[in-house]
Image (tube, rainbow, N blue to C red):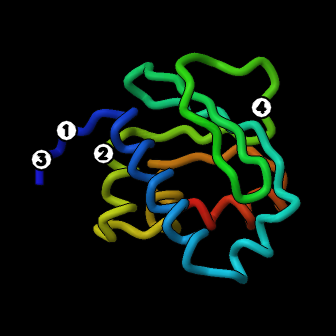
Amino acid sequence: MSDEADGREVLERVLEEFKEKMEEDESLRDKMEDFDRDIQVDFESGEQYNLSLDGGDVSDIKDGELEDPDITLTSDAVTLRKLLDGEIGAMEAYAKDKINLDASFTDMLKFKNLL
């Protein structure tokens, strides 16, 4: 697989897989029930997107930066794609400073369900 990736396409894939997990996993739906957060996604390429979680529902991806997001994910599209494909683990990506999550500890624990 190529070492190039488009941020928006990868983010759309993340959300698609999250929605599938939500449909299939009742315990995940229960965990996410009261999880309402605004999320900023910043790619190292300069692409910026945002979305909202309202319980298990995910908004459409919007272009641009949020003024005061609850969670900010910073990475590059290739790393995010590799996480989705199982080529790299989340802890390895974090340890290699390939992914950064600015969020409360509680939000980090819930947010991992997206990946």
* In the image, farthest residue toward the front: 23
Q: Distance between the residues labelled 2 and 1?
A: 6 Å
Q: How far apart are marks 3 and 1 (CA)?
A: 5 Å
The circle on residue 78 is 2
Residue at the image point whose x is 25% and y is 39% from the top: 5
Mark 2 or mark 1, earlier in chain: 1
Q: Are marks 3 and 2 in contact (CB under 8 Å)?
A: no
Q: How crowded is mark 2: few (under 14 residues within 10 Å), some or many (20 or more)?
A: some
Q: Are marks 2 and 1 in contact (CB under 8 Å)?
A: yes
Mark 4 or mark 2, earlier in chain: 4
Identify the residue position indicated by label 4 in the image: 69
Identify the residue position indicated by label 3 in the image: 2
The residue nearer to you, when weighing 55 against 7, is 55
Helix, strand or loop for disc 1:
loop
Residue at the image point whose x is 34% and y is 38% from the top: 9
Q: Note whether 24 is above or below 13 in the view shown.
A: below
Identify the residue position indicated by label 1 in the image: 4
Q: Do the residues labelled 3 and 1 touch (CB within 8 Å)?
A: yes
Q: Quadrant of residue 77?
A: top left
Helix, strand or loop for disc 2:
helix
Q: Kindly identify the amino acid type of the residue bearing the numbered disc 4.
A: Pro
Q: Note whether 109 is above or below 14 in the view shown.
A: below
Mark 3 or mark 4, earlier in chain: 3
Q: In this view, does 47 lie to the left or right of 26?
A: left
Helix, strand or loop for disc 4:
loop
Q: Distance between the residues labelled 4 and 2?
A: 23 Å
Residue at the image point whose x is 45% and y is 48% from the top: 98
Residue at the image point whose x is 12% and y is 47% from the top: 2
Query: Which quadrant holds the N terminus?
Result: bottom left
Where is residue 21? Give x, y as percent. Answer: 54, 71
Q: Kindly identify the amino acid type of the residue bearing the numbered disc 1.
A: Glu
* In the image, farthest residue toward the right: 34
